Structure formats: structure tokens, C-alpha cells
Image: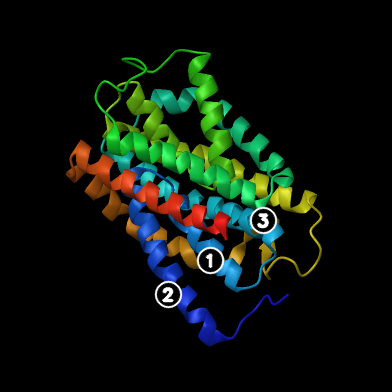
């Protein structure tokens, strides 16, 4: 298997990574999504071209995405926090339960195929997209967030599923909070903080999972630790961090409905891309 390809073949992917890094950072600030929903599909294309084994390709995409989300989510969270729109009480109540779900999912990822991870990505993205594009004000489960144990179960579930997708939890938390009557702007801001609770333990978990999987030498690309490719992380992080503040400004400038439509369409694009890869 080839790990490296000629430079002229890599330029399109370098350009794609650059553009995707900037877009991912922008969307992280605008939607509190942690950037993984943008980066995972791009990584999948790049690692496919590089000849990465199908058995570990999606795992590498997810783990690398989570590592990149760490600084991006921190930057986005701090930016939203300055505007006073973060639900700090919710984040505090999830400080233990969300990382617990993340760690469990990271270790379980060893036993899930790449196709299985892509299938999870598609299902969640479609559900979230439908809710955002076609939701009515009457689509609510309650007038406020549930008390425990319901709130804890939701937090653990968000952390668990988001870790399989390589995302910061925003796509699920935005849906959860708005279904319980919280404003979308507050949900977006809080999701940025949730990304911190998911990405840090998720990164550690995918490093450990990669080692526990006992992957043969040469199957993963160079400069990879566990399921984290350090070269990709180093390249993308500065781009996402630069773009985050612009996304935050857009989030607070757009109306609720504009945010819903933009986010919903984005989710369908992501779901379509992975659905196509499953058919192939």
C-alpha cells in the first residue's frame, strides 16, 4: 500500500484542506459544531487517495477530527462566552457525564467498521437536517430542559454518538436544546463549550484505541499516534482558529430561521456525501 503520493497529486488535497480548514473554523463559530462535520468527509477523500486501508480509514478521519476540534472549540467557546450567551449551568451539569460517554465510545470504536461509522454519520446528519429545515415552533418536547436523570442521559448520549462521528456535539446539542424551548443562538453558543468536553477525552480515547487495535506497521500514514495523524492536525489547526471569530460574528448577526436553514442544508450535504461513499 502506498502511503505517500507524488507532490502534484497532493496539491488538490492541500488546497481542499486549506479551504476546508477555513470553512470548518467559520462553521465552528457560527454553529458551535466543532468543525468535524466539515473535516471528516474531506479527510476521508484525502486518506482514500493516499491509499490508507479501508479498515482504519474512517477511524483515522474521526480521531484526527477530534484532535483538531480541541483548540477550535476552546476558541469558539471563549468567543461566545464573552457575549454572555452560553448556558454555563448545563455545561457544569455535564462536566462528568459527557466525557464518560466519550471515553466509552472511543474504546468501542475498535469494534465498529469504517462503514459502520459512516452509517452513523449519515443517520444523525439526516435527522438533524430534517428537524432544522422543516421544524415548527410546535415541535417541542418541553418548555425547558429536562431534569435528571433525563438531562444526564441526553448528555451521555450526545457525547457517545458525537465521538463516533468525530464531531464536537453541536449538531446534536443544538437539536436537543431547541426541542426544549431554548433559543438557537444559546444552543449554538453552549455547543461550543460542549465541544471542549467531547474533543479532549475523545482525542485521548482515539489515541488509546489505535494502540489497542494493534494495527500492523505501514497500515497508517507517517506521524500517526493511535488514530490521530499529527501532520494533518498541525496543518489544519491554525486555519480553523483564524476563522472561528468570523463565524461567531455571523451567528449573532443572522436570524434564528437563517441559522436553521443554513445549518440544515449543510447537514444534508454531509449526509449525501457519506451515503454516496457507502453505495460505492
- Badges 3 and 2: C-beta atoms under 8 Å apart? no
Q: Secondary structure at mark 2?
A: helix
Q: Is residue 24 above or below residue 265?
A: below
**Mark seen at residue 45:** 1
- Badges 2 and 1: C-beta atoms under 8 Å apart? no
52 relative to 212 in the view: left or right: left
Q: Residue at x 71, y 41 (%)?
A: 107
On the image, the x and y values in percent for residue 120 come to 56, 42
Q: Earlier in the sequence, mark 1 or mark 3?
A: 1
122 relative to 231 in the view: left or right: left
**Mark seen at residue 221:** none
Q: CA distance from mark 1 to mark 3?
A: 16 Å
List the residue tagged with mark 2: 15
On the image, the x and y values in percent for residue 29 come to 33, 48
Q: Earlier in the sequence, mark 2 or mark 1?
A: 2
Quadrant of image for the N terminus: bottom right
Q: Earlier in the sequence, mark 3 or mark 2?
A: 2
List the residue tagged with mark 3: 227
Q: Is residue 276 above or below residue 157?
A: below
* Residue furthest front in the image: 279
Amino acid at each position: 500500500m502506498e502511503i505517500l503520493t507524488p507532490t502534484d497529486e497532493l496539491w488538490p488535497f492541500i488546497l481542499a484542506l486549506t479551504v476546508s480548514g477555513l470553512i470548518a473554523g467559520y462553521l465552528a463559530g457560527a454553529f458551535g459544531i466543532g468543525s468535524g462535520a466539515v473535516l471528516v468527509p474531506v479527510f476521508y477523500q484525502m486518506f482514500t487517495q493516499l491509499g490508507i486501508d479501508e479498515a482504519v480509514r474512517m477511524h483515522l478521519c474521526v480521531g484526527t477530527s477530534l484532535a483538531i476540534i480541541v483548540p477550535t472549540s476552546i476558541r469558539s467557546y471563549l468567543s461566545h462566552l464573552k457575549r454572555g450567551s452560553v448556558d454555563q449551568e448545563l455545561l457544569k451539569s455535564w462536566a462528568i457525564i459527557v466525557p464518560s460517554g466519550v471515553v466509552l465510545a472511543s474504546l468501542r470504536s475498535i469494534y465498529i467498521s469504517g462503514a459502520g461509522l459512516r452509517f452513523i454519520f449519515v443517520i444523525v446528519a439526516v435527522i438533524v437536517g430534517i428537524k432544522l429545515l422543516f421544524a415548527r415552533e410546535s415541535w417541542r418536547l418541553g418548555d425547558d430542559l429536562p431534569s435528571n436523570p433525563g438531562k444526564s442521559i441526553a448528555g451521555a448520549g450526545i457525547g457517545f454518538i458525537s465521538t463516533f462521528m468525530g464531531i464536537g456535539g453541536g449538531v446534536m446539542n443544538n437539536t436537543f436544546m431547541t426541542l426544549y424551548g431554548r433559543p438557537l443562538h444559546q444552543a449554538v453558543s453552549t455547543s461550543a463549550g460542549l465541544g471542549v468536553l467531547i474533543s479532549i477525552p475523545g482525542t485521548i480515547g482515539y489515541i488509546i484505541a489505535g494502540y489497542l487495535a494493534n494495527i500492523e506497521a505501514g497500515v497508517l500514514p507517517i506521524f500517526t499516534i493511535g488514530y490521530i495523524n499529527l501532520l494533518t492536525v498541525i496543518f489544519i489547526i491554525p486555519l480553523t482558529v483564524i476563522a472561528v471569530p468570523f463565524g461567531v460574528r455571523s451567528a449573532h448577526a443572522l436570524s434564528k430561521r437563517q441559522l436553521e436553514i443554513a445549518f440544515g442544508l449543510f447537514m444534508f450535504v454531509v449526509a449525501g456525501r457519506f451515503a454516496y461513499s457507502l453505495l460505492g
